[in-house]
Image (tube, grey):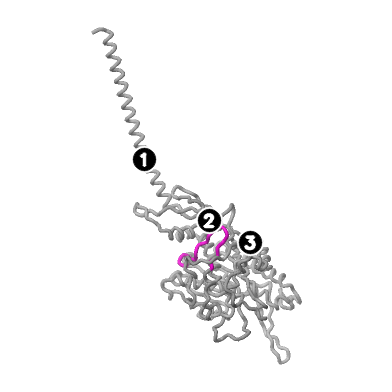
Amino acid sequence: MSPLKKSSIFHILQRRKNQLIFTSFLLIFSLIIIQNLSFTSNSLTSITETISTTVPTSTSHLLSASYFTSSFSSIYNTSTIIAAQKITPKENGLNLVIPPTPIENGSNKKINHSQKTTRKKVHKFVKKKRNSCDIFEGKWVLDDSDPNPIYPPGSCPFLDDTFNCFNNGRFDLDYLRYRWQPHGCNIPRFDGKKMLEILRGKRMVFVGDSLNRNMWESMVCSLRMSLDDKNTVFEVSGRKQFRAEGFYSFKFQDYNCTIEFIRSPFLVQEWKFPVVKGVVETRREMLRLDLIQATTSNYHNADFLIFNTGHWWTHQKLRKGKNFFQEGNIVHPELKVTEAYTKALKTWSKWVDKNVNKNKTQVFFAGYSASHFRGGQWNSGGNCDGETEPIKDDKFLAPYPWMMRIFESVISKMNTPVVYLNITKMTDYRKDAHPSIYRQPRAERRPGMIQDCSHWCLPGVPDSWNQLLYAYLLMNSKNSKKIH
């Protein structure tokens, strides 16, 4: 064989060898890539599933601040968007983060539309703009989509007769069809079972005047409605009338929690003592602006304190301010009610800062609840019967109360965080929801009777106050992950 032919065969074999080596290298490289891709996919799946089961799907919450000057309305969105969550388009101008579909036994279960809607409302308070949504700025809207109210009229045995408008003959119930809707965000419907979980093993105490009693009875009835066995809630104080006595407590046995009311219309100490002039005995009343009411030992260590004071400061004897206000041994011959109210609130604020453990107790203050007397005041022929719908035009609302401006100034200097439930404006719309003549049964009414245009029918407007309180506690509860 010629040398030329040998060289040609050698080159062909060499090329075939190189091709075989290159093909083998490609095959090995491909196998390595396929194996790595499979590992990465499994890892990502594992990570995603771990995130979806360990990271709470709701991290939006309300911000509690020490120095509130308008309301507890700042609602900050701190949601972290992770791989297990989807971002929907804007709904009503709000970005809503929808939690992932729950995974059970490796398979996705469908959630119906009503469940999704409820989950959005309960889990997410979403800011419209950069900072906040003021849940006390809004309007009352007709809403028949959810069962209203939380407890049916006439169903709660714990209501004061004067608040039980349905049992007293008020059958025009359109005032119960209205729902409070803040501008720019939604609030969750009151859920009694979740509220009871928040309250488990705790004390919630309402301290103040009869408007706070309105709110307290609303809370008791709303929680009772969620119980399967209504006999597990009972009155610890052993009384059935709530008007005259000063302390009342209901215990929810299965949750070992109590909802209490302590009457303290001024928050500071009111003195009442007899004065004898000749053969005539009269009763003298004075207000100690420098002393908190003596019953404070009953509630300073409660878990939740809801205070209020307001309506009693509008009474004529306080407006005159003559020989009624006392500090130490000094009785003021005359003192403006604005000065007296400021002194009283400062006494209250100092007591709270000194005696309330802010690491244990959350303090709330309910704002001034609007009245709607026409043609006079409560004791001079004022009335509100026949009103069937809320005020629709803001120009008919009353100016912001002077008492609340003083309150805002006082709490701005406190060390203890106080959550201001600024209900003034939302109540000012509701001229239709007072007991009016239905504070009494028909058989007991007389011509010219005093109408109640200050308090509220129950069920009714105070249920919405408790809805806002529930929203705050839901988002700030240490057990919120479990509750959700």
If the image is split into quadrants, where does the C terminus sit? bottom left
Give the SS element for disc 3. loop
Residue 301 vs residue 84, the one in the foreground: 84
Q: Is residue 239 visible?
A: no
Q: Is residue 458 visible?
A: yes
Give the SS element for disc 2. loop
Give the SS element for disc 1. helix
Q: Position of residue 483 (x, y in %)?
A: 46, 61
| Crowding at mark 3 (Cα within 10 Å: few <14, some 14-19, many 20+) | some
Q: CA distance from mark 3 to mark 1?
A: 55 Å
- Residue placed under numbered mark 1 in the picture: 39
First in sequence, mark 3 or 1: give its number.
1
- Residue placed under numbered mark 2 in the picture: 92
Does residue 244 lie above or below 391 as drawn?
A: below
Residue 335 vs residue 194, the one in the foreground: 194
- Residue placed under numbered mark 3 in the picture: 70
